[in-house]
Amino acid sequence: MNEWIHAMQARKWMKKNESFLPVWHAYVGAELNLFHHFKKSRTVEDVSEETGYPVDLLASWTNVGVAVKHLKRRPNQTFRTSKKRCASLVGRNASPGVKALLKEIMELHMPTLLNYPKYMRSQKRARFDHERHGGIVAETSALLEHFAIKKIKKMIGDRKVTRIVDLGCGHGGYLRKLADDHSEVEMIGVDINEVVIEEARDKSRGYDHVHFEVGDIHSWTPDEGKADVILLHNIFHYVHPDSRQILLDHLNSYLSKDGLISVITPISETEHGEAFSSAFNSFFVAHSNLFALPTKNQLRQITSDCQFELFDLDPIIKEGSWFTFWLSPGITLHDLRQTQLAGSTEQTLAKQQQMSS
């Protein structure tokens, strides 16, 4: 009887965790461009001869593809990519963001999570290789641009801005999107990864007012003058919790009196995206040189301990628990603290105008 119970429990777990297969299958197909090779009905043997991939491994992959409905079995032992299921992975509407996300999950997150027993037993952590994986992180971070850029453009459009600095700029996507509307504004992107900066420079050819520098955000400052807007996106989990206030104090040293800092970060222990954010947090704390996601309470503490006021704390991707907010050294938000964490941009701007009049 006990053996039967154990077998049924195992069966339930197997069914529950079949959802891993579509992710694995999509990752392999995207990484090896297999969805393109099967865009038209093809036999496994034909694709094997064309690519050099072993027939047996390819056949196993196609069988999984049929099971998870990424591939369709056609006559004469041929297979074809499902246009409906795999539209984001092949063809005119293929998304490089989906491929980048699959790559990050399978090459970074999953190996780390699978090694949790080893880290716990040895009490040692992994070490994140910024040089090796910086490009992948830059690609997935770029996915946030589309959700956040409208809010950033609106705030900048309502203010007099002469210089924008993007710290941890990745491939420079935010600056290019802003540069299209603000050709008169000097823009500087800073990242510690030289390879990432070279990619940013290459992608930003033709933007004469956009420049990129290799630098450590903890010590980098402009050669002269101050910044009116600082972008601090996807950064906090790379900074030790004890050093986050120090970093903000450093940014305050070259932020203009009426300047703003735009912050985007996943947040732990929120009402949104609990499963994803907790898994994301598990990945970071498993590394000796990455750190836990901040909580709302920690953000409040940073706000009260440093010279910044925090406002417009809003989720931009609820299922991932990604939040955006602003920090300002020159706005008193005492009257707005009764709202979520400060109030709306419109309220803040009205308050600022009242103070300056």
Image: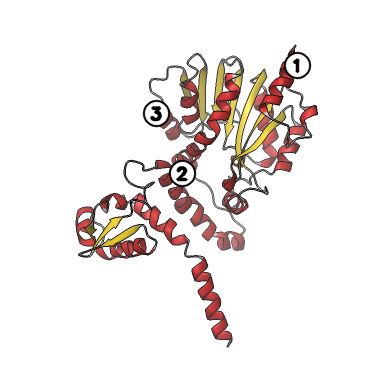
Secondary structure under the numbered disc 2 in the rendered image: helix
Residue 297 spot, x, y in % from top left: 74, 42
- Nearer-N-terminus badge (1/2): 2
Q: Quadrant of the C terminus?
A: top right
Question: Contact, CB < 8 Å: mark 1 with mark 2?
Answer: no
Colour logic: secondary structure
Depicted 215 relative to depicted 127: above or below:
above
How far apart in space, not on screen, are marks 2 and 3 (Cα)? 19 Å
Q: Amino acid at mark 3?
A: Lys
Residue under pointer 1:
354
Res. 221 in view? no
Q: Which residue occupies 58% across, 21% down?
A: 156
Q: CA distance from mark 1 to mark 2?
A: 47 Å
Q: Which residue is mark 2?
A: 133
Q: Indicate left or right for 184 with 306 as reference.
A: left
Q: Is residue 98 left or right of residue 48?
A: right
Mark 3 touching mark 1, by CB under 8 A? no
What's the amino acid at mark 2?
His
- Residue 142 x/y as whole percent: 48, 37
Using a 10 Å C-alpha cutoff, classify the residue at mark 3 as few (fewer than 14 neighbours), some (14 to 19) or many (20 or more). some
Is residue 58 or residue 241 the one in the foreground? 58
Q: Residues within 10 Å of mark 1 (few under 14, many from 20)?
A: few
Residue at x 33% of width, y 51% of height:
83
Q: Relative to 79, is 234 on the left or the right?
A: right
Depth-wise, is mark 3 or mark 1 nearer the camera? 1
Left of 240 or right of it: where is 191? left
Distance, label 3 to label 1, CA atoms, is: 42 Å
Which quarter of the picture shows residue 44? bottom left
Question: Can residue 59 be seen in the rendering of this structure?
Answer: yes
Image quarter in which the N terminus is found:
bottom right
The residue carrying mark 3 is: 203
Residue at 27% over, 51% down: 39
